[in-house]
Image (cartoon, rainbow, N blue to C red):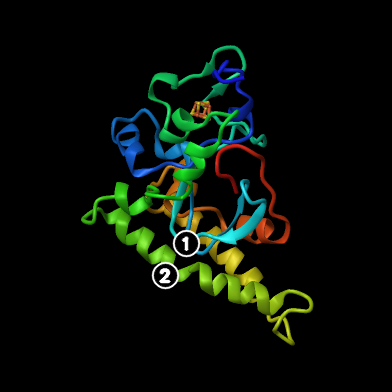
Amino acid sequence: MNKCKRCGTCCKKGGPCLHLADADLITQGIIGPQDLVSYREGEPVFDPVKAVVFPLSNEMIKIKPAGDTHRCRFFDQKYGCTIYINRPLECRLLKCWDTREIERIFLKDTLARRDLIPKSAKLREIVDSYDRTFGISNLLTIIESERPGGSGDNPTGRLDAMIEADRLFRERAVSLIGIDPDTLDFFFGRAVGKIVQAITGASGGKGKPST
Ligand code: SF4
């Protein structure tokens, strides 16, 4: 095979990671913050090319899956990609019979939250504050110290406390600041509890760069 049949197999394995070249899709409202999830620098993610889990060297934003599936939320069983004319860079480059082009851009020039939230925006301050409070390197240290057989000799409950503090932060962001709950995964990234889960059992599909 050397031609895309638009069978949707790649779309069912996960949405794309966005690159700087995709920024207009967001500023033009074709893809909204409710459609996205951010992975912060240092988060362990799955590399489907090498089939290994590795820490992200730079932030990454992906299109969310539909519900509990891996399927890209823009894929429709009947109509295929519902944003086909405006599909992101990785979707345009992915050829399932030859993955060289997509491998070439893997995690290069990725879009990050701060490319999309103006410096002067109040939301930018809130995102900065969240990242300071729930930093990935701090989280990884706590996970390591609390896991059985880890470097810590006495679990302190700090991990549970961080998961709960994150939950409360998000709850307040919605109730006090009015952030749309569907956009929390974009502005703050995956919840701490979800990152912990991913670290203890990360997996991914083959195709576009995955998590
Ligand atoms: S944006 Fe469209 S082409 Fe890309 S993975 Fe989603 S459904 Fe498929």
Of helix, strand and loop, which one carries label 1?
loop
| In the depicted structure, whether residue 107 falls above or below residue 81 | below
State the residue position of label 1.
57
Residue at the location (55% across, 30% down)?
Answer: 73
| 1 or 2: tag closer to the N-terminus | 1
Amino acid carrying label 1: it is Ser
Percent across and percent down for residue 76 are 57, 19
Of helix, strand and loop, which one carries label 2?
helix
Percent across and percent down for residue 124 are 31, 56
Residue 99 left/right relative to 86: right
The quarter of the rendered structure image containing the N terminus is top right
Residue at the location (74% across, 87% down)?
Answer: 153
Residue 175 left/right relative to 142: left
Cα separation between marks 1 and 2: 17 Å
| In the depicted structure, whether residue 116 falls above or below residue 164 | above
| In the depicted structure, whether residue 7 falls above or below residue 144 | above
State the residue position of label 2.
132
Outermost residue, top direction?
78
Percent across and percent down for residue 54 are 59, 60
- Of discs 1 and 2, which sits in the foreground? 1
